[in-house]
Every structure is written in C-alpha cells, then in structure tokens.
Amino acid sequence: PKLPNLAPKDEPGIAPSLVVAHVSRPSEPLPAGRYRLRVEGGDLVVRSASAEDPSSAEGRLEPPPLEASGALLLVVEEGAMADDQARGLALFSQSSSALTELPRAASLHRSDRRFKLPAESLLELAGHGLLEGEVGGYRLLATDRQALEGAALLAGPLGDRLEGRILPEMELWLRLSPAAREMTRITGGLEQAPFISKRRLQRWQSAERLLDVLSGHYGDLHLEVSQRGALVLTLERSGPKS
C-alpha cells in the first residue's frame, strides 16, 4: 500500500525545502524539533521550526570584520545576558605549519566571565604571559600581539551591536577556506603522530574532507541561536548571488 506523505508542507512564497529533518532529542546547540534545509538567495540555510518564516526574522546585523582581523572563527554570547556579561572567543590562523605551535586566540569579555583560551594552561606553565587590551567596552586577552590586534578590530563592531538592540543568544562565524587550510595542517601533523588513535584520526580526516568540500562552494558559515530558541545555520555562497 502507498504510505501517506507525513512531511509538513512548505508555506506559499517560501523557497521549497530540500530536506525536512526531525530531531527527537536536543543536542547543543540544536534543540529538539523540526528543521528545514532550503536555498535562500543562493545561500544554503537550515532553519528550526520557530525560525522557518524568513519574513518574521529580525534584520541581521552587519557581521564583524573577520577577514580584516585575520580571524577564522568567532563565537559570541550576547543576548542571553546583560550587556556587561557579553563575551566572545576568536581563533586566528597559525603563523607556521608546525603542529607544535600553540593555537593563536583571543578572548573578548565585558566582565570576569570569559571563555578560556585554547592551551591557556600550557602557556601559563611555560611562563608565557597573555597580552591584555580594552576596546569598545570589551576587555581583551590574547596569546600574542597579532591576535590582540585582530581582537581589537572585532571588539569595536561587537560593542556597537550592544546599543539598544535585541541580540541573538549565541552567534558563530567560520571562514571556511582558512578553516579548511588549518584543518589540513592539523590533520597532516596528526597523521605523523604515534600517539593518536585510528578512530580519532579518522574523525579529523572526515572534518578535513567536509571543510574542503564546503569551502569549494561557500565562503562563510554563520550560526545564530535566538533568545526564543530559533536556530538558523547559513552557508553563504562565494561570489555574487543571484
């Protein structure tokens, strides 16, 4: 017998869904519920059920200047807390291909509640002091001078976003091409390391292949989780959009 189509229908005037998925159990940052994959303006977009109607979404704020700052990844938590509790973490491309080079990173925070930097404990053990600064109401803590300068370029625009706006609970930006190159650097080193398990190496290799494919078609990845639980993940197409 022919089974009925139980998939929810697309609303008129909204791009048709390529995939409709149901998540039965929450897995951070994904809440349980229905998700749709669509093409919107040339971008590939995943929306949760509470964010399905693009016309009801608040206008997206101008993204921070990741490329100018040299950052390949930026995650910020703003809307879930008071302005003086906002915080962010930026990761920057490495200056060499050596796997032994510690991650270059910076924390941006408006209080003592901040993200811990990758390998911060190792830096402390080595007696390597972190560099400090302050821009746009954000206190900065960075692993080196270049990361501190990059964080300063991000802090001003991030501070401007806090002025009288309802902000997402969490946002993440990832520049796919630099991230793919960084993943290739890490995976190449792990392949030569005797201490890495085969299963863990395969996970890194899978992530490398995924980033390599995505970076060939898309420029940036943007994830936004609103205070009302709506989730939007966007793969922004490289080049001019139709």
Image: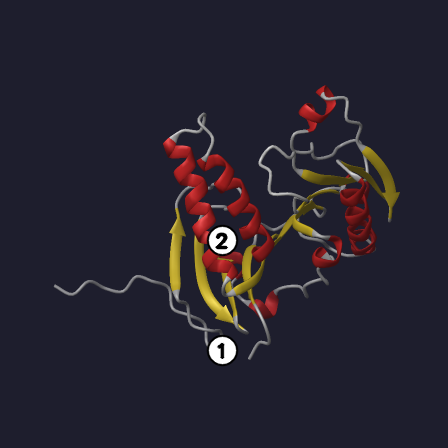
Amino acid found under the numbered disc labelled 1: Gly
Residue that mark 1 sits on: 13
Mark 1 or 2, nearer chain start: 1
Looking at this view, name the residue that lies furthest to the left.
1
Residue that mark 2 sits on: 211
Amino acid found under the numbered disc labelled 2: Leu
Classify residue 151 as left or right of residue 29. right
* Quarter of the rendering containing residue 124: top right
| In the foreground, 214 or 55 | 214
Tell me the residue at 80%/52% (across/down): 153
Report x, y in % for residue 45. Answer: 51, 63
Question: Which quarter of the image is occupied by the N terminus?
Answer: bottom left
| In the foreground, 17 or 44 | 44
As helix, strand or loop, the secondary structure at mark 1 comes to loop
Image colouring:
secondary structure
> In front of the other: label 1 or label 2?
2
Looking at this view, name the residue that lies furthest to the top.
125
